[in-house]
Amino acid sequence: MNSIKITNKRNIIIGLFLSSFILLSACGNDSSGSTEDTKNKVHKVENTTKDKPEEELAPLDILNQLATLSTQTEELYVTGDIVIGEDEEVKPGIYDLEITGGSGNIFGERSSVSSLFINWVGEAKGGDYPSKIRMILFEGDTLEFSDISKVKFNAVPEKVEPSNELGIGEFVVGRDIMPGDYKLSTNAKLNPEFENLGWNITIYNDENGQSRDQMYTATNDDVAVSLKEGEIISISYDNTDYGSSSDDAKLIFTEL
């Protein structure tokens, strides 16, 4: 499984990222291969044109191209699971998932990207929980909704302005925020009575297949993170300031 055939731009993007995770899973428990060998296999693609050499794309390139596939939807009634696919109502891409009806949970299964968990809480605008969640969706992913009746998938533009203030969802280093070393803070009010509630951050690195976790709470507020290009940051927030909207809450990254 050293390469995949590609026939169009959409297959390049989807195939590259899915094969990346499949290969990493296959090699993750095998200590006989070197790290460099694994890296060389992850993003190698066999080009269908004879005049171009084999192309190897970095994770950031793949995710930037994935954003070009994002396709805006109208408001959708949730009548069952939503499957992500080229031939489905919701295409692969990067979206701000907007909850327009109901209040509940969003679960799901990744077709291959098992290290990026789908487990969110949301509700229609006006409540304590977020009404918008940034999501990176790949071919074959499935979204499962509980007590949420209507949603809308807002396509994130192909090009975005990096920011040092991020909300809830999945964000790409080098795209949504620049690489670097940062100290964390927040504009949200955190209740010290809840020592384990606040911001939860998981940083996934596709090149080594590893994730690392960090928390920022009222009693654990001296926290720094190092972000590398192409990594994916999953950010969730436990709102203990009842009456305030989670949509306004931001995790702030200040350069060290």
Image (tube, rainbow, N blue to C red):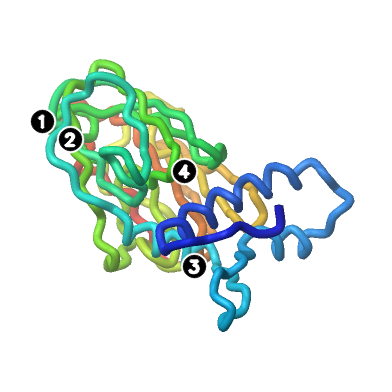
Cα distance, mark 1 to mark 4? 25 Å
Q: Is residue 9 left or right of residue 24?
A: left
> Which residue corresponds to the image point at 35% horizontal and 46% vertical from the top-left?
86
Q: Which residue is mark 4?
A: 201
Q: Secondary structure at mark 4?
A: strand
Q: Of the two numbered discs 3 and 1 on the same chain, state the one appearing first in sequence.
A: 1
Amino acid residing under circle 3: Gly
Q: Of the two numbered discs 2 and 4 on the same chain, state the one appearing first in sequence.
A: 4
- For residue 180, which numbered disc appears in the image? 3
> Which residue corresponds to the image point at 44% horizontal and 38% vertical from the top-left?
140
The image shows residue 64, relative to residue 213, as above or below, that is: below
Q: Secondary structure at mark 2?
A: loop
**CB of mark 1 within 8 Å of CB of mark 2?**
yes
Q: Which residue is mark 2?
A: 245
Cα distance, mark 4 to mark 3? 16 Å
Label 4 packing within 10 angstroms: few (<14), some (14-19), many (20+) = many
Q: Of the two numbered discs 1 and 4 on the same chain, state the one appearing first in sequence.
A: 1
Amino acid residing under circle 2: Ser
**CB of mark 3 within 8 Å of CB of mark 1?**
no
Label 1 packing within 10 angstroms: few (<14), some (14-19), many (20+) = few
Q: Secondary structure at mark 1?
A: loop
